[in-house]
Image (cartoon, grey):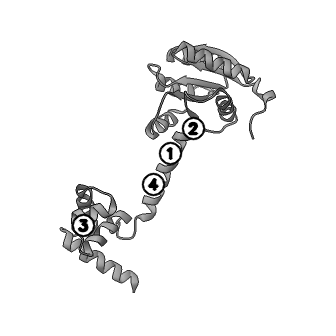
Amino acid sequence: MPVSNGDRCRIRVLVAEGHRAARVGAVLALEAAGFDVVEDCATAAGATAKARERRPDVCLVDADLPGGLPAVAAIAALRRAPRVIVLARSGTVDDVLAALDAGAAGYLLKSISGDRLAVAVGDVASGHVAISPPLLDDVVCVARAVRTARRDVDATGLTGRERDVLGLLAAGLTTKQAAQRLGLSATTVRRHVSSAAHKLGVHDRRAAIARLETVQRRERE
């Protein structure tokens, strides 16, 4: 449930942002939304010290601050730790996961509007995780890919992609043709063949294809 405007006044926020204009903008947006901004600072060390001293509920930490990620970890490790949101100009899935691993509860792009920032701060204060939509889409894609990869590993240990490669080669396609059909490079196809051969306990492509055909025949029986 979204945090109401009345509840926002009880949420204490610290803003650590290296750029003065961005810091002032975040403070004004949060205050206008009803939050109690108890501190703002321009360094990672300041963020850690003030978080320890002022005991905010939520800390916003600029990812570009020198020592920003260690500061996130230090704040998240405090007794009765505040919830931490990382603010960044851009980011990748790895950046998001690194922030979450450090103890952050959110990763937001600095292009976020004041209204959306207020909603995210309220959500995080309520125990949720907040990630900017473009980055969240990427995180979901990675999670789905991992799930698919796990599902595609069969009793032989082959992935679905390795089976696809061997199946096309068994049908008479060349390495180049198989690569074009699957949208891969020839080098990647060869790597899949090598991996499949190793898993099947054989030493070359022809033996790998024969072994897979035997396995498939047994599966149909």
Label 3, label 4: how far apart the Cα atoms are: 23 Å
Q: Nearer the viewer, residue 107 or 218?
A: 107
Q: Which residue is mark 4?
A: 145
Check the image and report above or below for 212 versus 130: below
The dot on residue 127 is none
Give the alpha-carbon distance from disc 1 to disc 2, as whole Å. 9 Å
Label 3 to label 2: alpha-carbon separation: 41 Å
State if disc 2 and disc 1 touch (CB < 8 Å): yes
The circle drawn on residue 131 is 2
Q: Earlier in the sequence, mark 2 or mark 4?
A: 2
Tell whether 86 sits left or right of 4.
Answer: left
Q: Report how far apart the C-alphas of labels 4 and 1 lie in the structure.
A: 10 Å
The residue depicted at 34 percent of the width and 70 percent of the height is: 156
Earlier-in-chain disc, 3 versus 2: 2
Query: Which residue is pictured at 23% across the width and 58% down the height?
Result: 186
Work out whether mark 4 precedes mark 1 in sequence or the reverse, and give the earlier one: 1
Q: Name the disc covering residue 197, or none.
A: 3
The location of residue 110, given as percent across then percent down, is 55, 27
In the rendered structure, are the residues bearing label 4 and label 1 in contact, judged by CB atoms less than 8 Å apart? no
Q: Amino acid at mark 3?
A: Ala
Residue 164 % position (x, y): 34, 68
Quarter of the figure with the N terminus:
top right
| Residue at horizontal 29 percent and vertical 61 percent from the top | 180
First in sequence: mark 3 vs mark 1: 1
Secondary structure at badge 3 equals helix
Q: Amino acid at mark 2?
A: Ile
In the image as oriented, which residue stretches furthest toward the bottom?
A: 221
